[in-house]
Image (cartoon, rainbow, N blue to C red):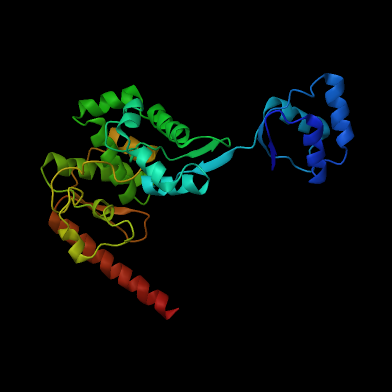
Amino acid sequence: MLKVSHGAPLRVVVQALARKGAISSPETVILWSDVLGLARSIREGEYEISPGDRPYRILWNLISGQKYYRKLTVPEGFSITQVAARMTHLGIGSMDENLELMSDPGFLQILRIPSTSLEGYLFPNTYYFSRGSTSREVLSMMVSRFWRVMTPEWRDRLHGEGLTLNQAVTLASIVQKESGTAKDMPMIAAVFLNRLHQGMKLQSDPTVLYLLPHHHHLRAGDLRIDSAYNTYLHEGLPPTPISNPGIEALRAIVFPKVVPYLYFVSDGHGSASIFSRTLQEHDRAIRRLMRKNHGDFEDQASQ
């Protein structure tokens, strides 16, 4: 890694590279720059220089601004708190500054976010940015990617289904947390939409766990938490998304399956779900899974 300051002479930069062992013939690089009249053309920034790079390649990188870019990966289902932590780890703002900006009304208005924070709108992807990029720039990059995915055609389709954008993103964020595989997402989306249409509570564990970020499983008492995010107590959707959904979860809300199911349960291995029309069918599915998983546990214990 090489940091080039504004106005740094080429000879100084090349000699620094030689001391790092990145180049073995600094005079050749300087000669080429003099012959081509490029000595004053190098750009400031951070550069990734490999020992095997040829002198002309090093010179080209320095004058063309082929800088080293930092990488930020946002996995599907990350919360804004997790995104803020990764940004802070990479030196982009402090944790408090990032979280405050993610809920700043003026910033949300500029980004056209119809919610009280950026939760749900930081599109999961891998982003590259140069040293000196601000929190505002990096967050804008993520939201810009969201708007490229959430096309006007998709928004029109959601409107036709009676969903606002924030409702759709909120539901997608729940589907993201509930689904073990992308192929299950349109079915799980359909179950939640069916429950909403029939005035049933969603009864989604992840919405309650959103209130308990350090918990991985719910306890009986957690279901009594009086919050709009507790979909066991309150009908309808939570007031905001609970995670940042990826493209498959968003697509599942835009194009859900047309099925009569009102219940689903995971097979316990995160690979598939069993769907049911009635509570009785759902209870039977749960009992079958409990017997199967108990048998799997006994088989593993005997090995």
* Closer to us: 110 or 145: 110
- Relative to 227, residue 33 above or below: above
Please provide percent x and percent y for residue 76.
Answer: 41, 45
**Quadrant assignment, res 43:** top right
Q: Position of residue 47 (x, y in %)?
A: 68, 37
Q: Is residue 107 left or right of residue 196?
A: right
Instruction: Please tell me which residue is depicted at 23% across the width and 62% down the height of the picture.
Output: 286
Above or below, 254 relative to 174: above
In the picture, measured across the screen, residue 8 lies left or right of residue 189, that is right
Residue 67 falls left or right of residue 129:
right
Q: In this view, which residue lies farthest toward the bottom?
A: 302
Given residues 69 and 96, the one toward you in this image is 96
Q: Can you say whether 139 is above or below 230 in the image?
A: above
Specify the quadrant of the image occupied by residue 162: top left
Q: Position of residue 195 (x, y in %)?
A: 16, 44
> Picture coordinates of residue 287 (x, y %)?
22, 66
Q: Locate the C terminus by quadrant.
A: bottom left
| Image quadrant where one finds the N terminus | top right
Q: With 251 as the anchor, is 198 left or right in this view?
A: left
Q: Tell me if residue 224 comes above or below residue 60 in the rendering.
A: below
The residue that appears at 27% across and 40% down in the rendered structure is 170
Q: Is residue 76 visible?
A: no
The total number of labels drawn is: 0
Residue drawn at x 35%, y 36% as measured from the top left? 121
Q: Residue furthest left?
A: 199
Between residues 47 and 128, which one lies in front from this camera angle? 47
Residue 152 sits in which quadrant?
top left
Residue occupying image coordinates x 35% and y 41%: 100
